[in-house]
Amino acid sequence: MEHNDYYYEYNRNCSCEECTCGKKDYLPKKDIVDIDIPDYYIGKTHKYEARKVVEDFELSYNIGTAVTYLLRARRKHKSPVECITKAMAHLKFELEKIENEEV
């Protein structure tokens, strides 16, 4: 099969643009579920998806979740208070995790 028949998940450690290194996981297109990403998770100008920003920066779960809450804070609800509060909670969880690792 040709590459056009497959969808790939990029391996962060791979720097090549071709499949020749074998570091990209290719999945048949038929196995992919088409998921609608809500508009409040996609940037307006450059169309970056919040999850892809989190992945690209290799953020931990709590930091990544806080970032996604902050990115959508003024776009999902009339007031950003709920999203900011949730982001703060995840930042607190991350601080607790770091403090426990240092003990």
Image (cartoon, helix red, strand yellow):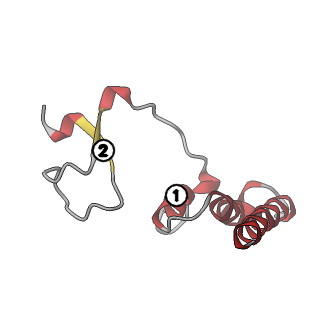
Q: Position of residue 20 (x, y in %)?
A: 13, 51
**Callouts 2 and 1 close, C-beta under 8 Å:** no
Residue at x 21% of width, y 34% of height = 5
Give the residue at x 27% y 49%. 24
Circle 1 residue: 49
Instruction: Answer few, some or many: residues within 10 Å of disc 2's Cα (few below 14, many 20 plus, some between 14 and 19).
Output: few
- The secondary structure type at the circle numbered 2 is strand
Q: Position of residue 93 (x, y in %)?
A: 78, 62
Quadrant hosting residue 33: top left
Callout in the foreground (2, 1): 2
For residue 75, above or below residue 26: below
Q: In the picture provided, is 18 more to the left or to the right than 57?
A: left
Q: Quadrant of the N terminus?
A: top left
Q: Position of residue 63 (x, y in %)?
A: 66, 65
Q: Report the amino acid beneath label 2.
A: Tyr
**Which residue is the extreme one toward the top?**
30
Query: Up-down: is 76 above or below 59?
Result: above
Q: Secondary structure at mark 1?
A: loop
The image shows a total of numbered marks equal to 2
As drawn, is 47 to the left or to the right of 11?
A: right
User: In the visual, does 95 lie left or right of 23?
Assistant: right
Amino acid type, callout 1: Glu
Q: Which percent across, then down, holds residue 101? A: 70, 67
Label placed on residue 8: 2
Foreground: 96 or 101? 101
34 or 61: which is nearer to us? 61
